[in-house]
Image: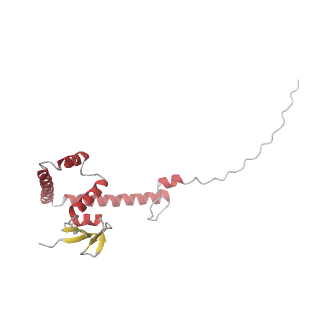
Amino acid sequence: MSKSRIIKKYPNRRLYDTEESRYITLADIRGLVMHKIDFVVIDKKSQADITRSILLQVISEQEQLGDPIMSREFLAHVIRSYGDTMQSMVGSYLEQSLKLFLDQQQHFRDRVKSVVGIDPLGVVAGLAQKNYQRYKSVQEELLRTFGGSTSHEEPEPVEAKLAKPAPKRKVKPRAKKKIRPAAKKTK
């Protein structure tokens, strides 16, 4: 079994990767998890293993971005489970349920790949990349056609255009009309 990578957490809250000899962020910790690299986070001052605490920070950060995985109700149930006589069973159940879900997902991907001959996730990622390239080329063509620009610079956002004052137009002075005295009416 390989030795776990050591990450040290200093009192200034910075994380230091001892293998790469550099400071890292929670995003880097997430990267280690995503690449299935075994690591342990040690508090430099107390020498305590604080890996779980750091992983919870990563989860919290991820939950604040985009679409969260855990609903408010789910989180409330988890909180209620602490101190309950079934606490250890709840943790084990959640862990096993997630493992089962991931195993089934991988099994499904493997089955589709064996039948169709391609990885469905790879196909979706490829289609998304092609669609992005098509969108980008259409956008550039529209800018060349209607905007007169052939550069690859980002177009100015509409909000910025609206915030600018309208250019002043030159107004031609009108010719003055001669006012004629009213003609006297004769009886």
Query: Which residue is nearer to you in this view: 161 or 82?
Result: 82
Colour mode of the rendering: secondary structure
Query: Which residue is nearer to you in this view: 144 or 100?
Result: 100
Asked whether the viewer can see residue 37, the reply is: no
Query: Which residue is nearer to you in this view: 7 or 64?
Result: 7
Task: Name the quadrant of the C terminus.
Answer: top right
Residue under the image location 21 percent in, 47 percent down: 74
Q: Position of residue 153 (x, y in %)?
A: 45, 64
Compared across the picture, whether 187 is left or right of 64 comes to right
Task: Name the quadrant of the N terminus.
Answer: bottom left
* Residue furthest out toward the top: 187
Residue under the image location 23 percent in, 67 percent down: 32
Compared across the picture, whether 22 is left or right of 49 comes to right
Compared across the picture, whether 149 is left or right of 21 comes to right
Residue under the image location 38 percent in, 60 percent down: 136
Q: Position of residue 156 (x, y in %)?
A: 48, 58
Q: Position of residue 89 (x, y in %)?
A: 11, 51
Asked whether the viewer can see residue 164, the reply is: yes
Q: Position of residue 101 (x, y in %)?
A: 14, 54
- Dividing the picture into quadrants, the one containing residue 9 is bottom left
Residue under the image location 25 percent in, 62 percent down: 54
